[in-house]
Image: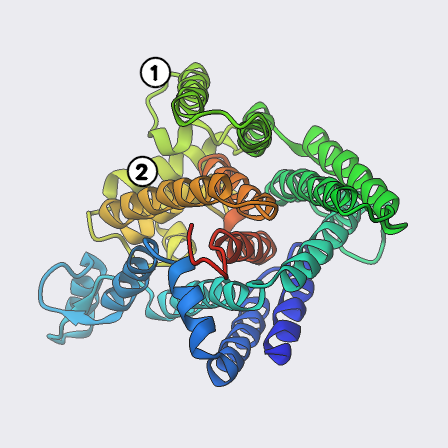
């Protein structure tokens, strides 16, 4: 299992470079590392490990498989439901053959491979983070590397760091900054939990505690700076949602609130979040709700994607095909190169039914992790961090395309995988 753990950490470190230059090559290497790590897990996992992993992913396995199955269906020739571009091709070439749901089989195949790579990394994380030592090491690596990456992005954005090409990074920075804030809070909480545990055993405070708290403070400041520099109001609110999610779990646990009081607190939080979302929603704008919160995107990108959404059928155009469709909708002088938001890209590429399944799966994942955090003992901060991370991912999906970046996706995989692993007690098997 140590080989799988090493490959998993290498995947995280390598993925950080894709924050600057993402593309097919980076995604292919990440997919290769994920496949190798999963193969190592399969070779060395014991029956007890498989049992714990199965309990950790209970309630989410089937939902995670649905998008992959649909992407595979989009690649198959079909007599009905094929995109109209194939009938045009048949007429132009004078042939009669079945078409496909996807307009670009190569891009859909790559998207399917990368989706499976992300699922594989979550599965590997569940196995390698099932014990406290593995989970703690992953948390330390993430808490260390996230502020370093954030600083590098900030310096490159301001052209102070000449190592990388200057770029905007307006999509990646808010998500990485929000992750950094949550990871810093998680590390600080872990440090306080360990200090309390040592105090109960009358053991002296470890020298590394002060260093861990200092590192957490630095990561918190750097993450907040990243959001302040590049984020929009929506990004600020999403980061607050994540922090409140994490904080509410700590409040419920530390004050030992009864079930009815905890339910009232979470209901109040959900109501407040819904009111904030409605406050940010403008019913006078004649654009899709999937584009309402992408306030950082240019107007021509919103307009183009709105037309794409209107023309897209229930079956979608094929995973990863947004860029393929752009030339068909580009206006003269348009500089649009990507979708305004991940949500709009998913709705166009996968179709509305699968998009709704993905949103429902994300919401259910948050519920599972939140409940797991409340049910766990001293290690509850892991599923709490994962629940908060999932909240940020879900919110950012409607505001930008950060989730389509390999770096953001892999960090999210790692945090969620550790949270799923630690939401289940290895000894008792309870959640």
Is 357 left or right of 402, judged from the image as shown?
A: left
Lower position in the chain sequence, tag 1 or tag 2 = 1
- Write down the quadrant of residue 188 in the picture: top right
Q: Foreground residue, 165 or 66?
A: 66
* Residue at the image point whose x is 72% and y is 58% from the top: 141
Q: Which residue is mark 2?
A: 307
- Mark 1 closeness class: few <14, some 14–19, many ≥20 residues within 10 Å: few
Query: Which x, y percent locates residue 108?
Result: 36, 65
* Residue at the image point whose x is 58% and y is 63% from the top: 129
Looking at the rendered structure, the secondary structure element under dot 2 is helix
* Residue at the image point whose x is 47% and y is 42% from the top: 375
Query: Which x, y percent locates residue 384?
Result: 55, 41
Q: Which mark is residue 134?
A: none
| Residue sticking out furthest to the bottom | 43
Looking at the rendered structure, the secondary structure element under dot 1 is loop
Residue 23's place in the image compared with 305, above or below, is below
Q: Are marks 1 and 2 in contact (CB under 8 Å)?
A: no
C-alpha separation, residue under disc 1 versus residue under disc 2:
18 Å
Is 36 left or right of 304, judged from the image as shown?
A: right
The quadrant of the image that shows the N terminus is bottom right
Q: Is residue 418 visible?
A: yes
| Residue sticking out furthest to the right | 207
Q: Which mark is residue 283?
A: 1
User: Mark 1 or mark 2, which is nearer to you?
Assistant: 1
* Residue at the image point whose x is 54% and y is 33% from the top: 249
Q: Is residue 330 visible?
A: no
Residue 131's place in the image compared with 96, above or below, is above
């Amino acid at each position: 299992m140590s080989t799988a753990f090493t490959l998993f950490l290498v995947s995280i470190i390598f993925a950080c470079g894709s924050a600057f230059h993402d593309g097919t090559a980076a995604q292919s290497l990440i997919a290769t590392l994920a496949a190798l790590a999963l193969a190592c897990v399969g070779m060395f996992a014991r029956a007890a490990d498989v049992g714990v992993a199965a309990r950790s992913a209970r309630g989410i396995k089937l939902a995670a498989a649905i998008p992959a199955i649909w992407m595979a269906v989009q690649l198959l020739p079909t007599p009905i439901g094929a995109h109209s571009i194939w009938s045009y091709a048949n007429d132009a070439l004078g042939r009669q053959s079945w078409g496909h749901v996807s307009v670009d089989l190569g891009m859909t195949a790559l998207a399917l491979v990368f989706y499976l790579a992300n699922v594989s990394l979550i599965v590997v994380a569940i196995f390698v983070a099932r014990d406290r030592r593995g989970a703690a090491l992953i948390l330390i690596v993430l808490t260390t590397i996230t502020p370093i990456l954030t600083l590098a992005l900030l310096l490159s954005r301001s052209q102070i760091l000449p190592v990388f090409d200057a770029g905007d990074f307006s999509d990646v920075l808010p998500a990485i900054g929000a992750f950094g804030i949550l990871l810093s809070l998680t590390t600080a909480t872990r440090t306080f939990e360990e200090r309390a545990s040592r105090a109960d055993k009358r053991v002296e405070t470890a020298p590394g505690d002060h260093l861990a708290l200092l590192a957490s403070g630095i990561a918190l400041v750097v993450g907040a700076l990243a959001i302040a520099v590049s984020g929009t109001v929506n990004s600020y609110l999403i980061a607050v949602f994540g922090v409140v999610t994490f904080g509410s779990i700590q409040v419920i646990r530390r004050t030992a609130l009864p079930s009815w009081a905890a339910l009232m607190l979470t209901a109040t939080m959900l109501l407040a979040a819904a009111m904030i979302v409605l406050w940010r929603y403008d019913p006078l704008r004649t654009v899709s709700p999937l584009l309402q919160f992408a306030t950082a995107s240019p107007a021509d990108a919103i307009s183009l994607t709105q037309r794409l959404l209107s023309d897209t059928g229930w079956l979608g155009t094929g995973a990863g095909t947004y860029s393929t469709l752009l030339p068909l909708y580009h206006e003269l002088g348009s500089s649009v190169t990507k979708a305004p938001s991940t949500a709009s890209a998913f709705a166009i590429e996968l179709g509305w039914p699968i998009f709704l399944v993905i949103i429902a799966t994300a919401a259910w994942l948050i519920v599972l992790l939140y409940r797991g955090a409340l049910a766990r003992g001293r290690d509850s901060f892991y599923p709490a961090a994962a629940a908060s991370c999932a909240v940020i991912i879900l919110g950012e999906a409607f505001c930008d395309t950060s989730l389509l970046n390999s770096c953001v996706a892999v960090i999210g995989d790692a945090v969620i995988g550790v949270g799923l692993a630690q939401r289940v007690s290895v000894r008792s098997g309870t959640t």
